[in-house]
Amino acid sequence: MLSRKIIEESDIYLATSTRDPELFPLVIDHGEGVWIYDVDGNKYLDFTSGIGVNNLGWPSHPEVIKIGIEQMQKLAHAAANDFYNIPQLELAKKLVTYSPGNFQKKVFFSNSGTEAIEASIKVVKNTGRKYIIAFLGGFHGRTFGSISLTASKAVQRSIVGPFMPGVIHVPYPNPYRNPWHINGYENPSELVNRVIEFIEDYIFVNLVPPEEVAGIFFEPIQGEGGYVIPPKNFFAELQKLAKKYGILLVDDEVQMGLGRTGKLFAIENFNTVPDVITLAKALGGGIMPIGATIFRKDLDFKPGMHSNTFGGNALACAIGSKVIDIVKDLLPHVNEIGKIFAEELQGLADDVRGIGLAWGLEYNEKKVRDRIIGESFKRGLLLLPAGRSAIRVIPPLVISEEEAKQGLDILKKVIKVVK
Ligand SMILES: *Cc1c(COP(=O)(O)O)cnc(C)c1O
């Protein structure tokens, strides 16, 4: 088997990372739509979207590939923080127009989610305030600033510290597992109130004055933390609190943005208008790395305060523009297929939560979760873990009804066997 050999050699040459040869002895050769083929000719149905990057399928949507080839022949790197180019401007205009918030905005381009977060940290600290609030269970990346905000797995923070000073972590309103043991499905407003009170009556009283808090960073749905969906009114309440003290809301849409939840931006499900929004993962169409930070115009950097080499790359931006157009047209489809997932996934785990094509299946036992993922892989269905003991079920948004049912059938059979 070619796979075995490549995995063995990879372990010799590649830095140890999150790859797990036990769980996924998968060496990808190529992809076609929602299908992935390994180097031994095995075929897998993908319910991972490469962690929300290949939302338009593998290797990408045909129209995105076409635009990419055309743009590559004209201009790719464009020294976009020194000179100007059209694809960068066009993508910025689209992001400003389609993102929530009826006010003037600006965009800074980078190459990844973590860089989009680093830029956001500068944007909010540009107010002169020094503290940042983030949530337990949140994931914002792995560079120095963003890892300081990340708190989804303790191991992710080992060795790297000490971290950026001034970051305060507070509980996320996780309806299934929270420090107050509130059943957040039965008592959503009680859960929301606890979190808001915790910030206002404890953090602001005992730890930091609210006038010195620059921003609150959050994921509209926690991705890495387990596809955790907060109660419907949480962000509106958080916004009220933020407004009261002049604190900025930073909405990290790196994993949930661009159609995953059936809306272009996940926060649109929660009737809230953030001051800063980050995007990355799916924006590059599975082809180019790209990150974007969209923020209120009045929060603009001072000249020379922030920049990079590759951001605003004409190729990445031309691709991002096309991705946005395609995703906008795809939203009704996501909502249609999402209904199938909503129906079929019910009862398949101890907690089932989701919206659009962003689903989490949580098991009380991590062992059960791991066995389901392993057994599904053997039967040709790719799933990834998330959080403590959840599976994320996130197929490419282009998945057909037939393919969705095919994957769900495998999953149901596996769960019967494992349980
Ligand atoms: C993946 C992710 C990041 C980090 O993105 P990278 O491109 O891996 O740096 C940040 N925030 C969220 C919500 C993510 O899911």
Image (tube, helix red, strand yellow):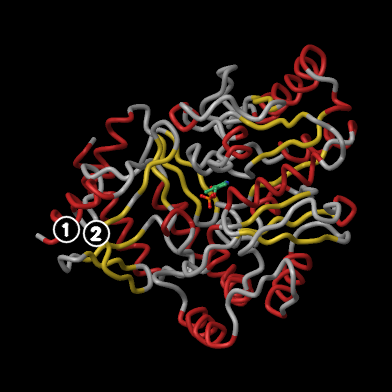
Looking at the image, which residue is at 30% across and 62% down?
45
- Residue at figure coordinates x 72%, y 26% from the top left: 166
- Pointer 2: what residue? 27
State the count of labels: 2
Residue topped by disc 1? 3
* Residue 27, image quadrant: bottom left
In the figure, is residue 18 to the left or right of 196?
left
Up-down relation of residue 182 to residue 125 (above or below): above
Q: Earlier in the sequence, mark 2 or mark 1?
A: 1
Q: Is mark 1 within 8 Å of ligand 1?
A: no
Q: Secondary structure at mark 2?
A: loop
Quadrant for the C terminus in the image:
top left
How crowded is the residue under tag 2: few (<14 C-alpha within 10 Å), some, or many (20+)? some
Q: Name the quadrant of the N terminus.
A: bottom left
Q: Hey, what amino acid is under mark 2?
A: Val
Specify the quadrant of the image occupied by residue 19.
top left
